[in-house]
Amino acid sequence: MDDVDRDEMPGAIVEECLRREQGVRALLDDLERLALEGDHETVRDRIRSFAESDRGVFFAVALALSNSQHFFGDVESQLGVEPADRLRDLAETYPTLAEPFGLVRMEVASDRKNPTTGMDVTTAYHREEEVPLVGYTLHSGEVELHDSRGSPSEVLGTASQLVEATNDALEAALRQDHSVNTDELSDLIERREHLKSELGELW
């Protein structure tokens, strides 16, 4: 419930969401149609616009679509069973929209942009150049973010730039006396050890 002001959650924004339920469902119907047509970038942009124009109602819808039992329990305790059931029906009616709403919720609440959720990797070989090739496609939900193919050295060149940028971000945080939470530090250590292991197997 840290996504919005705790004084507003969930009662006030849920009441506003339910007052506008017809319009909300019309929007969700349209988004579901676009998703089924494969227009995932438009779906993402429309959800972002919704979040920007009406943050509170957006969070109510996003939390409902996430099928959060904690959220539904809070709604029941504040407003009763009937409002909670109406929100549960959103999750049951529009399950395909749970992920795109969840990703935009992460963007809004945590200052992210196109959170990466997966990567497809392929390998090939260019006989004339005698060079292996690595292809990779980054995804954020159903949205394709980046599609590239290059030689191992080219791919590692990109990776090294990302590692360098990561170091710069951490050093800047330390210089400004900003703390880094323990979960992030733990994940960083795990990723670093994995990178060291993989790099150790390179020729």
Image (spheres, rainbow, N blue to C red):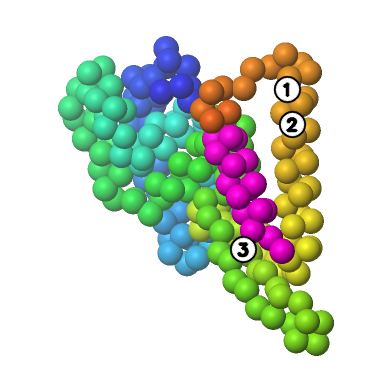
Viewer-closest of 184 and 109: 184
Disc marking residue 137:
3
- The crowding category of the residue bearing disc 2, from other C-alpha atoms within 10 Å (few below 14, some 14 to 19, many at least 20), is few
Q: Give the range drawn in magenta.
A: 187-203
Name above or below for residue 146 compared with residue 62: below
The amino acid sitting under disc 3 is Thr
Horizontally, residue 120 falls left or right of residue 8, namely right
The amino acid sitting under disc 2 is Ala
> Of circles 3 and 2, which is in front?
2
- The crowding category of the residue bearing disc 1, from other C-alpha atoms within 10 Å (few below 14, some 14 to 19, many at least 20), is few
Name above or below for residue 25 compared with residue 60: below
- Image coords of residue 148 (percent x, y): 70, 66
- What residue appears at the point 31 percent right and 28 percent down from the top-left corner? 71
Q: What kind of element bears circle 2?
A: helix
Q: Do the residues labelled 3 and 2 touch (CB within 8 Å)?
A: no
Can you identify the residue that label 1 sits on?
Answer: 173
Can you identify the residue that label 2 sits on?
Answer: 169
